[in-house]
């Protein structure tokens, strides 16, 4: 159990009863709880099937409405963590503010688009004011359909959009490309905020311990099951100098193109197994991993230099670092700088691929 809120209300005859909003860490059935409450404590419990999220349960018991003007203003709160206080809520307190925030409907692109469509349908059927379309409605369409280009939005508006959407899109065509980028930031904001609360190394460990999402088709996971043999490459002399003297690892040229009739060799080469095998004379897998961990966990210092991979094109350098882009997200990785641009405050990993070319 993660959170619990208890509201007291009165029946028509004045007898009190309670509503309990519960948030669990996983899905479960309530039949055994209902039987235990009746048999052990002689308490009758009924479970709602109309509430699917915590916010609607709290709103029902805490926020007054025209249909339900009397609600409990001093409910009891409990949490297994530190985000909520435990005890009776006092009007105007921090706990009351937290309950009000918890009673708001979380934004979801699919739900927003569905509600918007239902509202427009109801207006068309009842002949009320014409439906409107605004920027947030368009964000829901962009995220729900995974649009990445303005042309996709325009085509959707022309083929499936309401008249209000068509007018809104036509009026703001110059803004669509920028809105696509803004919609991506809006849609990922909650996940990004939660991720920023974790240390970078904690994020890496959490993903490393989780199951691979590629369902058995991940070259990285397959490589990890077949470890590289002992390399025995010691760090180069002078390692541990000043920060402006990063370790530079020279890589060999890419393998020659196979001739006609030869079996394909591209797949094995692209795996990290082949990368470290091909570079075993100049690159220590264990030492590189140690250096990356130190940088990610503690940041650069005089004794924690920034590793640099230097070599010809198409030798696997980007393949080695690409997982960090997927780990922290493209926007949180500082890529090749344009002119004298510096990393933004939100950069969690720096990858200036091709710098100096």
Image: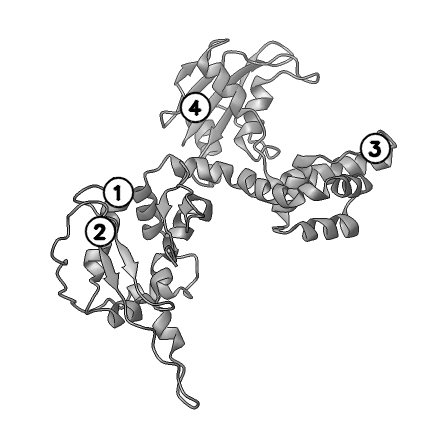
For disc 3, the marked residue is: 130
Q: Sequence order check: which comes first, mark 1 or mark 4?
A: 4
For disc 2, the marked residue is: 291
Residue 297 disc label: 1
Q: Sequence order check: which comes first, mark 1 or mark 3?
A: 3
User: Of discs 1 and 4, which sits in the foreground?
Assistant: 1
For disc 4, the marked residue is: 41
Q: Sequence order check: which comes first, mark 4 or mark 2?
A: 4
Q: Residue furthest right?
A: 127
Q: Residues within 10 Å of mark 3 (few under 14, many from 20)?
A: few
**Cα–Cα span, label 1 and label 2:** 10 Å
Residue 337 or 170: which is nearer the viewer?
337
* Helix, strand or loop for disc 1: helix
Q: Residues within 10 Å of mark 1 (few under 14, many from 20)?
A: few
Quadrant of the image containing the C terminus: bottom left
- CB under 8 Å between callouts 4 and 2? no
- CB under 8 Å between callouts 4 and 3? no
Q: Is residue 172 above or below residue 356?
A: above
The spot of residue 196 in percent (x, y) is 39, 36
Residue 165 or 239: which is nearer the viewer?
239
């Amino acid at each position: 159990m993660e959170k619990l809120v208890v509201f007291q209300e009165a029946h028509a005859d004045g007898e009190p009863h309670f509503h309990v909003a519960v948030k669990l860490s996983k899905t479960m059935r309530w039949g055994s709880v209902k039987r235990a409450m009746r048999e052990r404590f002689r308490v009758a419990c009924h479970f709602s099937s109309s509430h699917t999220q915590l916010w609607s349960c709290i709103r029902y018991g805490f926020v007054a409405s025209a249909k339900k003007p009397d609600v409990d203003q001093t409910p009891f709160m409990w949490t297994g963590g530190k985000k909520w206080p435990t005890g009776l809520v006092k009007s105007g307190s921090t706990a009351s503010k937290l309950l009000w925030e918890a009673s708001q409907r979380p934004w979801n692109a699919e739900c927003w688009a569905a509600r918007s469509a239902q509202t427009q349908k109801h207006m068309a059927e009842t002949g009320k004011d014409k439906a409107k379309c605004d920027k947030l409605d368009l964000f829901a369409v962009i995220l729900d359909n995974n649009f990445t280009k303005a042309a996709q939005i325009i085509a959707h508006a022309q083929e499936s959009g309401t008249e209000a959407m068509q007018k809104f899109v036509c009026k703001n065509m110059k803004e669509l490309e920028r809105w696509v980028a803004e919609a991506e930031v809006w849609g990922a904001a909650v996940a990004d905020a939660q991720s920023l609360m974790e240390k970078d190394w904690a994020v890496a460990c959490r993903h490393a311990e989780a199951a691979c999402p590629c369902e058995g088709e991940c070259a990285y996971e397959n490589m990890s099951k077949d470890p590289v043999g002992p390399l025995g490459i010691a760090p180069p002399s002078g390692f541990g100098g000043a920060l402006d003297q990063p370790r530079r690892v020279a890589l060999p040229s890419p393998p020659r193109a196979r001739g006609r009739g030869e079996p394909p060799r591209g797949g094995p080469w692209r795996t990290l197994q082949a990368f470290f095998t091909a570079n075993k004379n100049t690159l220590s897998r264990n030492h590189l991993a140690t250096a990356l961990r130190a940088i990610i966990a503690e940041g650069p210092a005089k004794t924690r230099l920034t590793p640099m991979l230097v070599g010809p094109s198409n030798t696997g350098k980007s393949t080695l670092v690409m997982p960090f882009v997927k780990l922290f997200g493209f926007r949180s990785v500082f890529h090749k700088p344009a002119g004298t641009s510096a990393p933004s405050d939100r950069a969690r990993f720096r990858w200036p691929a091709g710098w100096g070319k």
